[in-house]
Amino acid sequence: MDIEYLLWLQGLREAGGNFFTPFMQLVSDIAAGELMLVPLFVYWCMSKRSGLMIIISFGISKFINGVAKLTVCSYRPWIRDARIIPDSYALKSAGGYSFPSGHTMDSAPVYGGLAVIARKKAVWVSWLCGVMIVLTALSRNYLGVHTPQDVAAGTLLALLSVYFGAKVLSYIEAKPERENFVYLAGLVLCVLALVYINVKPYPMDYVDGKLLVDPVSMAKHTYGNIGSFAGVIAAMFLERRYVRFTETGLNLKGVVLAVIGLAIYEFLRVNVGGELLKVLGGSWGRFVRNFSVIFFAVTVWPVVLKVFAGRE
């Protein structure tokens, strides 16, 4: 049934002359690109707690996605059925295992978190975020790079990450004496996950002498996902213990500093991250890159905000 559904969407795509394809590509690109800039702005300028809740949820979702992909080892739709012809543009970022969808699990924690924090003061934002969650999932099916179960499970796991992220933050606020235990437990999970993905067996299926999915390559990406989660843990610990900044508010100085911080964040993510991959290699390069950009956002730039735009 899932393949028939994808074939039906593929037929619509072809019959419509790819009229909606650029829009679906845009929705998909937003999910895996600059979407994290929104919660960072919230964290720095508007509501430290709300922004941090989304960042925690994002880290949890990345961790779950990486481990789940290497556990299930599900092949992409076009591998399962040669009739599926994915969109060539979307195919560039759709390598490796299929389940659950990485795009939905990158975006749904952000959209879901924003929907939660906006539900009382800006209901229209919550509705818009809900629509974007559905559109992101649909775009991955429409472009032929994920099955419906990939995006359904990804969306569910991501929204559960928002729930757990909120619970974790509430727990450490209510029981600060247990805070270090939570951080330690998270780091232990990271170590166990790294060991797990390196020792577990993977399918080694060949077609015409070519390996369908290289598990070594997939493990490299999961190192990055685990790095994001570890970065959230380390950054939270240092910020809450030593930095303790206060959001700047929506004033000129605060907004300008936030925009500068977002530009630096993107530079680190795209340019410095690429250099780390060259120097450290695929696995640890991705781990350090993802760890570093989260650490910068949660701990380093707040120091700048505290110095130049601090308020009681």
Image: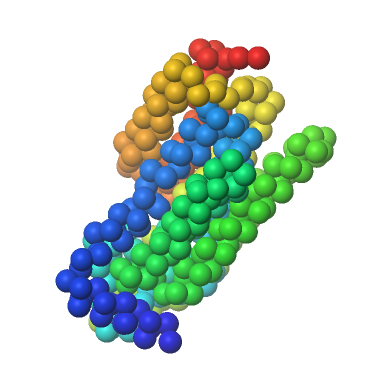
Residue depicted at x 61% and y 14%: 311
Residue depicted at x 33% and y 53%: 29
Q: Nearer the viewer, residue 277 or 41?
A: 41
Q: Is residue 39 visible?
A: yes
Q: Is residue 257 visible?
A: no
**Quadrant of residue 18 in the image?**
bottom left
In this rendering, the answer to whether 87 lies above or below 266 is below
Q: Nearer the viewer, residue 103 or 224?
A: 103
Compared across the picture, whether 278 is left or right of 305 comes to left
Compared across the picture, whether 196 is left or right of 286 comes to right
So how many labels did they put on this image?
A: 0
Residue 169 image offset from top left, x and y in percent: 70, 42
Quarter of the picture holding the N terminus: bottom left
In this rendering, the answer to whether 306 lies above or below 17 is above
Q: Residue furthest left?
A: 17
Q: Residue furthest top?
A: 308
Residue 4 image offset from top left, x and y in percent: 36, 86
Residue 59 image offset from top left, x and y in percent: 56, 48
Q: Nearer the viewer, residue 96 or 110?
A: 110
Residue 98 image offset from top left, x and y in percent: 42, 69
Compared across the picture, whether 18 is left or right of 276 comes to left
